[in-house]
Image: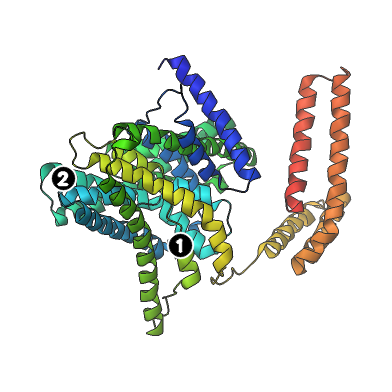
Amino acid sequence: MHAVDAFELVLVLLALVVALHWLALKFRLPPSTALLVGGGALAFLPGLPAISLDPELALVLFLPPLLMDGAYSTALGRFRRHLAGILSLAVGAVVFTTLVIGVVAHWLVPDLPWAACFALGAIVSPPDAVSARAVLKGVSLPRRLAALLEGESLLNDATGLILFRFAVAATLSGVFNAVEALRNFAVVAVGGAVVGAGVAAIWILAAKRLRDRTLVVVATVLLSWAAYLAGEAVHVSGVIATVTAGLALGWYQHVIFSAEVRLIGNSVNHVLVFVLEAMVFMLIGFSLRGVIERMGGIEAVPPAMIWTVFSVVAAVAVSRFAWVFGSDAILEIARRAGVKRAHPLGWRQATVLGWSGMRGVVTLAVPLTLPLDMPGRDLMLVCAFSVIFATVVLQGSSLGWLIRLVRPADLDPPAKMDMPATEAAMARARLTKVEKLAYAPDGALIHPMLLEEYQRRMVYIERYAQDADAAMEKLRPHFDVLLQAIAASREELIRIHRAGAIEDEVLHELERDLDIEELQITFQRGE
């Protein structure tokens, strides 16, 4: 394909992303489902060129920034608090699913070597960070459940990729040493965390010295790829390196970034993540054509393979439920035995957790890297796409319905302070500082209007902290008036500019001030 044709195709895909995303919002469907199905349907349009997704490029292009965004927005306190549960899912559930799928595949296809069967298990076992984020955006979950799903989606790709490499090497060489594999697993995982921490430390030093806000934002965008490629270059987990760097970014950005850099960076990252997530699902849908063509067409797929694929998809779902409910049963037994730190999820949260195993870009890209002489390669490709389609379309589309049906309760103890109380504490700190600076050294009041304004704000904040709902009902009409006043100012500013009375620079400066003021009021209004 000519370079210009490829660029035009990218533009067409972006336009289709906008259209499919709009349709998904209009019909209240998960956007990931609409993009996946839409991409799959469009792939078979007559005259449309075949799109081949280079697996190595897909992993490097899409995975690091999306992992970084997930780690950046992860609640680090809950991540540490629920680390044992996260590792149970990200390592234990992935290994368990790999073993289950390996056994099922070997039972259905006895001629397939055991190592190849476990390679198939490693391909379909890790739930995908991109798919999980895309689906979970539209649902409300208890804090512990959200922490488990977010943390799992950050780490399980590393487990799946490591297991996959071991299984492929064992298949091609015919040799497998469990002790050596476990040692290598630990080295790759720990090494990835060390590399990620090192890259993050370099980024922190650079961000402190870069004075230009654009350079800081660009350096931050590059951090994900720097961490991933650095990890892969020294043969450790690039996924864990990226996640480690992302957690450090989320922790230190509050004290390194200025308010302007944070606003600009968040806006840039929001658009970047939206485009990458959408393109992932579109390209996964388009890859269906390539998978079918490799098989020689739908009519060339043997009935035995269809039964195998169906069994693998079912085994993926069942094994996750078995691990989740089995782990929760162990926690319940421990709790009854008097272990104070054992806190089972309960059947409601466990049901949602078991149904939230969506697969995505890693499950698709990894089998495409298989050598052509790999036993069972075609079966692995078909199984990979089938698992992605079933989990994203069926599980992703029904997850919101399932949550409304089982109504998982938030059993975590509440934090010591809620948002109104925190806002009141911040307002007191601000008033205390203003009270000190409102008076000259000789005791004369030099900022009476400023002091009066902050004292009045403190009264409002205290009322809000006592009864947030009642206070907001009274304040919303006040905010509505302010927004209408800002709109009037904006109309007058544009009228003056259109009349040729002011320069463009004046327009842009004053419009930026109005935008910031409007954004602040909108946030305060609770929108």
- Is residue 50 placed above or below 279 in the rendered structure? above
Corner quadrant of residue 376: top left
Q: Residue at x 54, y 72 (%)?
A: 411
Q: Residue at x 39, y 64 (%)?
A: 321
CA gap between label 2 and label 1 equals 33 Å
Residue 171 circle label = 2
Residue 353 circle label = 1
Circle 2 residues within 10 Å: few <14, some 14–19, many ≥20: many
Residue nearest the viewer, comparing 413 with 31: 31
The picture places residue 397, in percent across and down from the top left corner, at 52, 52
Task: Kindly identify the amino acid type of the residue bearing the numbered disc 2.
Answer: Thr
Q: Residue furthest bottom?
A: 337
The picture places residue 52, in percent across and down from the top left corner, at 37, 28
In the image: residue 95, left or right of residue 498: left
Task: Kindly identify the amino acid type of the residue bearing the numbered disc 1.
Answer: Leu
The picture places residue 193, in percent across and down from the top left corner, at 34, 49
In the image: residue 514, left or right of residue 124: right
Is residue 223 at least partly visible in the picture? no
Is residue 466 at least partly visible in the picture? yes
Residue nearest the viewer, comparing 486 with 146: 146
Callout 1: helix, strand or loop?
helix
